Amino acid sequence: MNFVIKKGEGLKGEIIVPGDKSISHRSIILSSLAEGTSKISGMLEGEDCLATIEVFRKMGIKIINEEGIYSVEGKGLFGLEAPDQPLDFGNSGTSVRLCSGLLAAQDFRTQLVGDNSLSTRPMRRIVEPLLAMGAKIYSSKNGTLPLNITPADSLQSIQYSLPVASAQVKSCIMLAGLYAEGVTTIEENKVTRDHTENMFKEFDIPIEMQNSKGNKIISLSRVDHIKPTSIDICGDFSSASFFILAALICPNSELLIKNVGINDTRIGLLHALRHMGANIELKNKVDSIEPTADLLVKTSTLKAINLNIKLVANMIDEMPAFFIAAALAEGTTIVKDAKELRTKESDRLQAMADALKSFGVKYELKDDGIVIYGLGSKGIFNSTNIDSYGDHRIAMASAIGSLRSNDEVNILDCVNVNTSYPNFLDTCQEIGIDIQIYD
């Protein structure tokens, strides 16, 4: 599936983006481990989250969708059943890494597999701490999928300092910690998404958090049971980021993006764009387990920045959109300490550098970052063809960037947009973006 997008302006309207992907995964996982029925509304029905649902169905969990409300009949921490085939996680790195933590404590064997893209992504980062806890988990020789897990006599707690800023690694250890003897302690020296911590509280799972010398310390112990709950999932900030970008860079545009999650550990892009001069207003704020707001975004003249390295881990999924904003800013934008981008669905540093080159933007690619020489507020991108490398975020960022082309742009290999934003084209067309698909 390929996109063709024509230059655009005057984007108007009110939109609602799909449910938060991170929260959707965690809702299914914890609901399946609870004792009783949990209700989930606002679920992202993209391919990644549907893969998580199918994984738990294969382990005996009854999950029913009735008019957008998902009922999950949890069977408890040890109620999962042995699957009769490998568990296929599709393209979802979040799901395979989180589920590894809880599957390491089960009394049955499992093999975890994924698609070609997921099968190239690093898994040693979760295998090593799980082995330290006593798990019997093995990756391929390259440290990738498939993962093979066999029953362990027991899991033991560990004290673990995260070597990489990864909410997925943190969450994997937290889920394993629910089964481990003793107190599991995790230390992170860079802020990562705290959805798992919030969801633990929502399911009444005891957890302690404190700061020590600027680092966050998470402590938890083994639990005997988890209570079911009801969850209303907010809009995904990462999905909203593409339409924030669209309104900022298209002349005469004004968009209201409703009910978006504004968790402090997710909105690094918002801070970065405001620092660049973006006109983004938060309206109708609601403070809850996951705070939300409506985002009013207007066309803005952007100025280049040196991106604060403290924001990088916070905005890793939004970085492709940020690169497009930087390409249309006045001056030179510098991004450092972003090597993690090379381990995503594609090498996003290289993929976005290729996209910028096609658009006619000058840059210097570094091992852990990039320098982008912005074209300025009146800059125009080339009409061109861009390879998204099968990466949904590269495809969507490039599609939005195409609105500032001198004619039209073809974005190739876009089918994986369905992993996170299955109605992306509908939302685009709703606000006046001329986008079509072709084979």
Image (cartoon, rainbow, N blue to C red):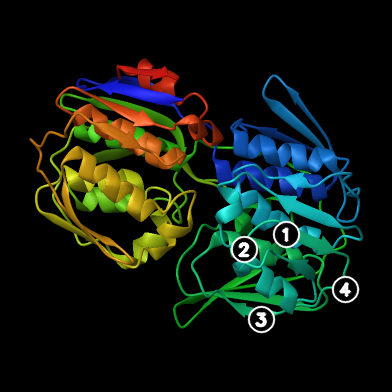
Q: Secondary structure at mark 3?
A: strand
Q: Secondary structure at mark 4?
A: loop
Which residue is at 32% across, 31% downward?
A: 399
Q: Of the two numbered discs 1 and 3 on the same chain, state the one appearing first in sequence.
A: 1
Image location (x, y in percent) of residue 225: 86, 57
Front position among marks 1 and 4: 1
Q: Marks 2 and 4: CB-CB under 8 Å? A: no
Q: Residues within 10 Å of mark 3 (few under 14, many from 20)?
A: some
Q: Marks 1 and 2: CB-CB under 8 Å? A: yes
Q: Marks 3 and 2: CB-CB under 8 Å? A: no
Identity of the residue furthest to the front in this view: 141
Q: Of the two numbered discs 4 and 3 on the same chain, state the one appearing first in sequence.
A: 4
Label 3, on which residue? 159
Which residue is at 50% across, 30% downward?
A: 415
Q: Marks 1 and 4: CB-CB under 8 Å? A: no
- Name the kind of residue labelled 2 in the image: Met
Report the Cα–Cα distance between label 1 and label 4: 19 Å
Which residue is at 62% across, 66% downward?
A: 143
Q: Secondary structure at mark 1?
A: strand
Label 2, on which residue? 123
- Name the kind of residue labelled 1 in the image: Leu
Front position among marks 3 and 2: 2
Task: Answer with left or right where residue 51 lies relative to residue 169.
Answer: right
